[in-house]
Amino acid sequence: MIVTGANTGIGFETARIMANKGANVILACRNSEKGELAVRRILDQDSVAKVQFSRLDLADLDSVRDFSDKFLVENKRLDLLINNAGVMMPPESKTKQGFELQFGVNHLGHFALTIQLLPLIIATRKSRVVCVSSQAHRGGSIAFNDLNFKKRRYAPWSAYSQSKLANLLFVLALQKLLTGTTTIAVAAHPGWTGTDLQRTFTFARLMNPFFAMSATQGALPTLRAAVDQNVKGEDYYGPHGFAEMRGFPIKVMTSLAARNQEDAKRLWTASEALTGVSFSETAPV
């Protein structure tokens, strides 16, 4: 399995717990030093864990392609792809290819990664793609005429919410493509979990000591989406408590906007155009 952004937070906990259960886990992270440290932390706890680090910078589509090419050469199966990495409310920033950073990393980078790995994922029976979204998707909308804030004034929360809605629309479109295969696409959100993701979100950092769950518990919705045998394509998991902020993972509902099939199809087309990655070009003959 691959877990993106696995050097810290719920990504690290997802990788650690799965490795403890015997999975062969690749920690796909941008920062090599932090990624290698995360591997050592897991091995310090479980010396026989099958874990390794592989560099992946989702803000650079060249890095995404290099990672995918390397993985496809070195591996014959991929049971789980956990699209976990993300950025939240940074100052206005761009990816290497000039995309707004949150849309570029949270959606486009994972879109390109998934599509390039998809032939191998489909070839692996009963495999899954799990995308980690957020309750922020409920306030999101997809600005198809300005996905990268080139015309609008940059608004960190609007950009984040758009990217998290895009995660769910991607799952919707991906599951439709997967019809007739044994592979499913599902999603999860961690509720209110205190992680390094919130380092630029002052309000969350101030409130985390009072309200946030630990990263270990915040990883449970992702883990259930990844391994529960009753999970079906398009399912969405989050905490069971009030406003889905805390608690144990159950199946929850997405917003109406996240179930819009036309928007999902339109976003897929736009994502192919922006990334230059198309499933028709990567699919096996």
Image (tube, rainbow, N blue to C red):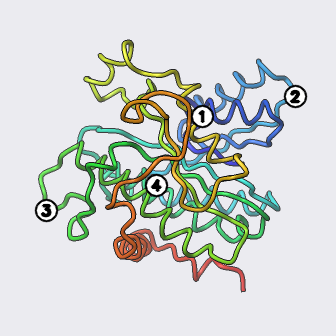
Q: Which of marks 4 and 3 is in front?
A: 3
For disc 3, the neighbor class at 10 Å (few under 14, some 14 to 19, many from 20) is: few
State yes or no: discs 1 and 4 in contact (Cβ < 8 Å). Answer: no
Of badges 1 and 3, the one in the foreground is: 1
**Residue 157 rendering spot, x and y as whole percentages:** 24, 42
CA gap, disc 1 and disc 2: 23 Å
Q: Residue at x 25, y 23 (%)?
A: 203
The dot on residue 220 is 1
Looking at numbered disc 3 in the image, what kind of residue is underneath it? Lys
Say which mark, if any, is on residue 58: none
The quarter of the picture where residue 121 lies is bottom right
* Disc 2: which residue: 48
Please tell me which of labels 1 and 4 falls first in the chain.
4
Q: What residue type is labelled 1?
A: Leu
Q: What residue type is labelled 4?
A: Asp
Residue ranking furthest to the right: 48
Count neighbours of disc 2 (C-alpha within 10 A) and say few if under 14, some if 14 to 19, many if 20 or more: few
Residue lying farthest to the bottom in this orientation: 285
Q: Quadrant of residue 98?
A: bottom left
Indicate the position of residue 150 as horizontal and vertical percent values. Answer: 18, 61
The disc placed on residue 60 is 4
